[in-house]
Image (spheres, rainbow, N blue to C red):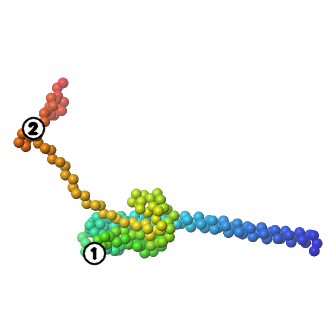
Amino acid sequence: MSSGERGRRSARGFTYVGLLALIVLIGLMLAAAGEVASTAAQRERESQLLWVGHEYRAAIARYWGQTRAFPPTLQDLLGSAPDAKIQVRYIRRLYPDPMTNAVDWVVVPAPNGGIMGVASSSKRPPLKTRQFEPPDQAFEGAAAYSDWQFTFQPPVARPRRTEPRPVSPRGSGGKTEPSPVSPRGRGGRGKG
């Protein structure tokens, strides 16, 4: 073998190694881009889950506000009974769970029957674990999306507060004396 032939083989070897390195680099870049895209898609599904969960919570609240009972099924949120005088739709449609893309919600039962909320059936750990809005503060530190329970708690009935009655002064026989009228008169400005 001549020195020129060895040089060409050596150059081909370096080209081959360089091409392999380039393929590995492109693969790593595609994997990183795929991870970023996957994370962005999961964040989008999380925000959709929060929106849909709020819609179900609001629909259950509207149902409870009209009937003073929780809906027996999610389908009951689609409208009132066919024989009702006024048809009411509490939710437009039964939204799918964005994490599973199916209407496979886990229903949260109310203490006295019915459904007081929904939760995702996904056991996947959420990306968002803090800085939730006030109605969702219980979601902080949740281990899975199924821990995000969108429930409606009816307001607790408080006893009416009565204002104390003014006590009449002693000796007046229960009658109070009229308050003195200012020197300017009752109807506005006095002479002056």
Residue in the foreground of this view, choosing between 39 and 92 = 39
Q: Quadrant of residue 66?
A: bottom left
Query: Which residue is label 1 attached to?
Result: 82
Tag 1's secondary structure?
loop
The percent coordinates of residue 42 (x first, y second) are 52, 66
Q: Amino acid at mark 1?
A: Pro
Query: Which residue is label 2 attached to?
Result: 177
Residue at image location 70% in from the left, 66% down from the top = 25
Compared to 167, does 79 lie above or below?
below
- From the viewer's perspective, is 138 left or right of 72? right
- From the viewer's perspective, is 146 left or right of 158? right
- From the viewer's perspective, is 33 left or right of 148? right
Tag 2's secondary structure?
loop
What whole-number distance in Å separates the C-alpha atoms at marks 1 and 2?
63 Å
Compared to 117, does 190 lie above or below?
above
The percent coordinates of residue 35 (x first, y second) are 59, 66
- From the viewer's perspective, is 29 left or right of 172? right
Q: Residue furthest right?
A: 2
Q: Residues within 10 Å of mark 2 (few under 14, many from 20)?
A: few
Q: Residues within 10 Å of mark 1 (few under 14, many from 20)?
A: few
The percent coordinates of residue 102 (x first, y second) are 45, 74
Q: Amino acid at mark 2?
A: Glu
Q: Quadrant of residue 6?
A: bottom right
